[in-house]
Amino acid sequence: MSKPIEITDDTFETQVLQADKPVVVDLWATWCGPCKMIAPMLEEVAEEMADKLVVAKLDVDSNAKTAGKYNVMSIPTLLFFKNGELVDQVVGALTKSQMLSRLDKVLS
């Protein structure tokens, strides 16, 4: 059973940029309602697609450096990385079908 991994500013490079699979990074905060709304969907995606990608969570309150580097102004923000490169970005909550559609493009 695979779950989203927790990452920090310190582990971002090794766990995201140097990952051997595509990575979806959920930039979130404990006080963010929409972040809590999409959390169960992200857990489902992490479990269902564990062989193809990694789902990671980065708390912006504790990790402002990474959020600033990618100009994150609103949360939730999802950053999609492939081979260490940012290939897509979504600001705001999305449905599972919207998420899977985005992932199809990233994984192809």
Image (cartoon, rainbow, N blue to C red):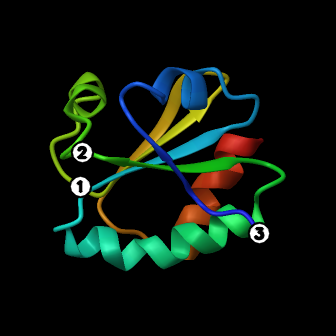
Q: Tag 2: residue type?
A: Val
Q: Are marks 2 and 1 in contact (CB under 8 Å)?
A: yes
In the image, farthest residue toward the right: 51
Q: Where does the N terminus fall, quadrant-wise?
A: bottom right
Residue 60 percent coordinates (x, y): 24, 45
What label sits on residue 18 in the rendered view?
none
* Helix, strand or loop at mark 3: loop
* Helix, strand or loop at mark 2: loop
Image position of 44 (left or right of 49): left
The residue at 74%/36% (across/down) is 21
**Pointer 3 residue:** 1
74 over 13 or under it: above or below: below
Distance from Cα at disc 3 to Cα at disc 1: 27 Å
Residue 81 percent coordinates (x, y): 56, 33
Label total for image:
3
Q: Earlier along the polypeptide chain: callout 3 or callout 1?
A: 3
The residue at 58%/54% (across/down) is 102
* Helix, strand or loop at mark 1: loop
Q: Nearer the viewer, mark 3 or mark 1?
A: 3
**Pointer 1 residue:** 75
Q: Nearer the viewer, mark 2 or mark 1?
A: 2
**Pointer 2 residue:** 60
Crowding at mark 1 (Cα within 10 Å: few <14, some 14-19, many 20+): many
Image position of 104 (left or right of 17): right
